[in-house]
Amino acid sequence: MNLNQLENNIINKKTFLCLGLDTDIDKIPKHLLSLEDPVFQFNKLLVDRLSKKIAAVKINTAFYEARGVDGWNSLEKTIKHIRDNHPDLFTIADAKRADIGNTSKMYAKAFFDKMNFHSITLSPYMGYDSVTEFLNFEDKYAILLALTSNDGAVDFQLQNELYLSVVSESQKWENSERIMYVVGATKSDNLLKIRNVSEKSFLLIPGVGTQGGDFENVILNSTQKNKRILVNISRAIIYAGNDENFLDSSEKVVDHYNSRTSF
């Protein structure tokens, strides 16, 4: 999937939502725990129910890595199910990788070739050569951390507007059209500055929902020139209910946010 197709899907579905599968086996509904792979089944049920009302799915690998081999099996089954059954959903590996070139090459092969994600989140701190291997894959995308939603963003990212340097410098790199950026919803006032140096770039915006980011401000400050944003919501959707009707509760949250979006 290329980014024009993703933007068209957003417009056609009338949704900016990205479903965050931060799936913690200790928090999923108890009636699923007797199944062979409760994490996969939880993910599958959510994606199948919500697929027509979301544009993307972000899988936070930490929640799967914490469970070792079992977790990785759940992750691989989840991404395969999405790609096989919902090919119009853009997929994000929220792995925050990046290292020296030969290591990044292996990370890229793992997530792009082996697991067939469309994109991966990366820490840009080590610079161009830690990212370039991810940019060599056609129709695959590197999502650089620019301005994150956590309180600690003030420690480095906001000092001398470092986040703007990350965006503006990376725009000069070869294959920069394959770069997207993470911008936290709790920093929505900075979105206009980011848009000034990355007018055509896609933005992945976490922090709405449990973290308290303002959905309307995000939309207002990031979509004046195009529809190239994905607003990720994780816990507020996937844990909206914890009984056998949990899918109904999750869908109500999705409908709530989609109803606040105009196209």
Image: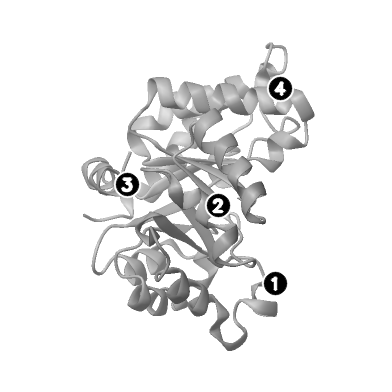
Label 3 sits on what residue type?
A: Thr
Residue that label 2 marks: 121
Of label 2 and label 3, which has the lower sequence position? 3
Label 2 sits on what residue type?
A: Thr
Query: Vertical placement of 33 versus 114: above or below?
Result: above
Query: Vertical placement of 48 versus 179: above or below?
Result: above
Label 2 with label 1: CB-CB less than 8 Å: no
How many C-alpha atoms fall within 10 Å of the one at disc 2: few (<14), some, or many (≥20)? many
Of marks 1 and 4, the one in the foreground: 1
Residue at image position (58%, 46%) is 94
- Relative placement, left or right, of 242 versus 226 is right
Q: Where is residue 241 in the image (x, y as percent from the top left)?
A: 59, 34
- Relative placement, left or right, of 216 versus 169 is left
Label 4 sits on what residue type?
A: Lys
Of label 3 and label 4, which has the lower sequence position? 3
Residue 212 seen in render: no
Residue lying farthest bottom? Answer: 160
Residue that label 1 marks: 152
Q: Position of residue 153 (x, y in %)?
A: 64, 73
Residue at image position (29%, 64%) is 200
Of marks 2 and 1, the one in the foreground: 2
Q: Position of residue 118 (x, y in %)?
A: 44, 40
Q: What element carries label 2?
A: strand
Q: Which residue is at the front of the view, 175 or 214? A: 175
Residues at marks 2 and 3, CA–CA distance in whole angstroms = 21 Å
- The structure's colour scheme is one colour
Label 1 with label 4: CB-CB less than 8 Å: no
Residues at marks 4 and 2, CA–CA distance in whole angstroms = 31 Å
Residue that label 3 marks: 15
Q: Which residue is at the front of the view, 162 or 128? A: 128
Label 2 with label 3: CB-CB less than 8 Å: no
